[in-house]
Amino acid sequence: MTEKPKYNDTYYEFTQIESRLITLWNETEIKLSDIDPPIDWRMVFGNDNPVEIEVGCGKGRFLLEASKRCPEINYVGIERAPKYVQHTRERLLKHNAKKVLIVWSDAPYFVNCYVADNSVKAYHVYFPDPWPKKRQRKRRIFNNDLWIQGLIRTLQPNGGQIHIATDYAEYFHEIHDRLTQPPPLFYVPPDSMEMEHIPTNFEMKYVKEGREIYRAVFALRER
Ligand SMILES: C[S@@+](CC[C@H](N)C(=O)[O-])C[C@H]1O[C@@H](n2cnc3c(N)ncnc32)[C@H](O)[C@@H]1O
């Protein structure tokens, strides 16, 4: 009898078959399995601009606002849920924000298998699924050592950043500890940040409900 696949195995299998890059500017979808890793951002975007990646872009509000505010950044949104990929795609097209790359994939799979060393200026991870039940906590993305190693490997040395927001205090502290102990990442105090943050759909919903939001930036020290 075949064993029922575990939660992560199901996603992994789906990811390997279905993952694709969606380039809005020329309306193209490329299967990840047809690409030789690592991805050359210069080839994809046709320029040398810095790359910032949003993980779990949901309905695409951050990508839309950030790409309008910072046209000199190449934005990438990774999302694994097809309905949110579609939502983000339609939203960006509607507002003519076509210079964004959408990656329909599982973020750890994409980052670990396709993103080149030192090639990302910043990651944005807003309201990652908190998996509040004790038995589900192992599904948390920041509970995955390979994921954290992948972030560190792919960030630009000397200042590459990870931006985090969550409404879940206990998860926030866990993320803080997992990213900073041991180094090379360190916590950046909020008053040293240049750009005002862009609220995502989840943030707007939670603020309306009166929930507290925990937010932090972590940066990479020299390797
Ligand atoms: C709670 S929602 C937050 C959406 C958005 N960041 C916001 O703040 O409005 C979490 C999102 O992350 C996506 N997600 C969760 N795990 C993921 C993974 N491993 N890879 C890619 N996307 C993921 C979910 O599908 C969902 O869209």
Image: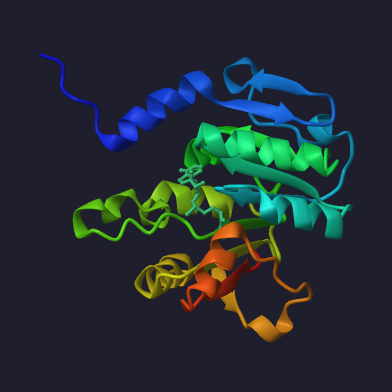
Count of numbered circles on the image: 0
Asked if residue 11 lies left or right of residue 134, the reply is right
Residue 184 visible to the viewer: no
Q: Residue at x 57, y 47 (%)?
A: 58
Above or below for 108 versus 27? below
Q: What quarter of the picture does the N terminus occupy? A: top left
Asked if residue 21 lies left or right of residue 203, the reply is right
Residue 129 visible to the viewer: yes
The location of residue 165, given as percent across then percent down, is: 54, 67
Question: Which image quarter: residue 168?
Answer: bottom left
Asked if residue 142 lies left or right of residue 59, the reply is left
Decide which of 61, 131 is in the foreground and name it. 61
Above or below for 218 versus 160? below
Q: Residue at x 43, y 66 (%)?
A: 175
Decide which of 33, 17 is in the foreground and name it. 17
Residue found at the far front of this picture? 208
Asked if residue 90 lies left or right of residue 19, the reply is right
Question: Which image quarter: residue 222?
Answer: bottom right
The location of residue 140, given as percent across then percent down, is: 36, 53
Q: Residue at x 51, y 37 (%)?
A: 80
Above or below for 134 versus 29? below
Task: Specify the color scheme.
Answer: rainbow
The location of residue 83, given as percent across then percent down, is: 54, 35
Q: What quarter of the picture does the C terminus occupy? A: bottom right
Q: Residue at x 62, y 60 (%)?
A: 200
